[in-house]
Image (cartoon, helix red, strand yellow):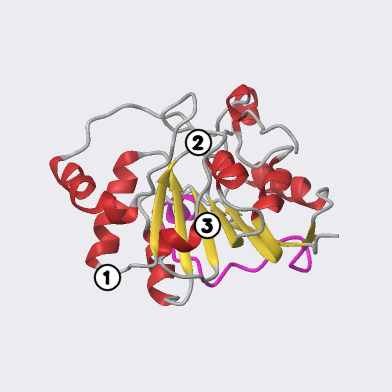
């Protein structure tokens, strides 16, 4: 069995700024974390996942259903909308910012959404090894930090090696969906997945059509307001041999 990958030897795709949550956010955590937030054993950092930690997906959701994972779920607008519209699927929001997690839990509870769980963790460590191999139907990465300065691009989530991590988590035929308003990052994403042997394009032409299951969020509106084109990509996981 291969040695587990040590993700903290690599730059993470976020800067986790400390900050006090509002009283309402604190209440949301206190009232809703027991149901929504997965309790994960940590490794070396507060957002790490211990190399031996594994999720029992059926136990976490109380059933077996297709699992959709959104990386960088922010305040949860996209994933709550999707979970409400797709009650036969299960959803996992991966986020490191506690205020966003608190807002997601509060809004999910208010909307009566029960097929959603959240995890406060570095996304690559969730995909490998925390989630069982082949357990995910879709991975969503919408408007992740483009780290547009040249000295920071090494921190982008979708970079060399990421497709391999995503391929491990995805079931055969599973789909990774991506969107960004930063052209350079979009081209990097496309290059990473075009070169990945475990993926094939699920679109024709240069870019995919806008994913109809993605609701308009503040990040997308901000990009449009600044005159940046929104570029979508989608890739299908090839069958394992």
- Residue wearing tag 3: 69
Task: Give left or right: position of 143 versus 164.
Answer: left
Q: Is residue 213 magenta?
A: yes
Q: Residues within 10 Å of mark 3 (few under 14, many from 20)?
A: many
Residue at horizontal 61 percent and vertical 30 percent from the top: 7
Q: Earlier in the sequence, mark 3 or mark 2?
A: 2
Which residue in the structure is indicated by mark 2?
49
Examine the residues drawn in magenta and state their main secondary structure: loop
The structure residue drawn at horizontal position 83% and vertical position 48%, both measured from the top left corner, is: 195
Q: Give the position of the C terminus as an image quadrant.
A: bottom right
Q: CA distance from mark 2 to mark 1?
A: 29 Å
Q: Is residue 55 above or below residue 63?
A: above
The image quadrant of residue 113 is: bottom left
Q: Are marks 3 and 1 in contact (CB under 8 Å)?
A: no
Tell me which segment is drawn in magenta: 201-225
Compared with 180, 81 (above or below) is: below
Which quadrant of the structure image shows residue 165?
Answer: top right
The numbered mark at residue 87 is none
Residue 99 spot, x, y in % from top left? 29, 42
Circle number at residue 112: 1
């Amino acid at each position: 069995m291969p040695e587990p990958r040590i993700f903290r030897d690599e730059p993470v795709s976020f800067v986790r700024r400390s900050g006090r949550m509002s009283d309402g956010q604190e209440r949301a955590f206190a009232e809703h974390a027991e149901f929504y937030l997965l309790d994960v054993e940590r490794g070396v950092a507060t957002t790490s996942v211990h190399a031996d930690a594994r999720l029992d997906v059926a136990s976490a959701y109380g059933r077996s259903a297709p699992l959709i994972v959104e990386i960088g779920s922010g305040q949860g607008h996209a994933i709550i909308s999707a979970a409400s519209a797709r009650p036969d699927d299960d959803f996992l929001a991966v986020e490191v910012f506690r205020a966003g997690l608190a807002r997601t839990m509060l809004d999910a509870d208010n909307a009566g959404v029960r097929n959603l769980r959240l995890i406060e963790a570095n996304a690559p460590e969730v995909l490998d090894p925390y989630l069982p191999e082949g357990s995910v139907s879709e991975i969503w990465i919408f408007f992740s930090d483009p780290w547009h300065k040249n000295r920071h691009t090494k921190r982008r989530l979708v970079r060399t090696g990421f497709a391999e991590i995503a391929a491990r988590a995805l079931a055969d035929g599973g789909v990774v969906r991506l969107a960004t308003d930063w052209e350079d990052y979009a081209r990097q994403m496309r290059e990473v997945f075009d070169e990945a042997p475990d993926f094939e394009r699920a679109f024709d032409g240069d870019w995919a059509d806008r994913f109809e299951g993605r609701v308009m969020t503040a990040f997308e509106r901000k990009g449009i307001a600044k005159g940046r084109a929104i570029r979508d990509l989608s890739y299908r996981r090839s069958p394992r041999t």
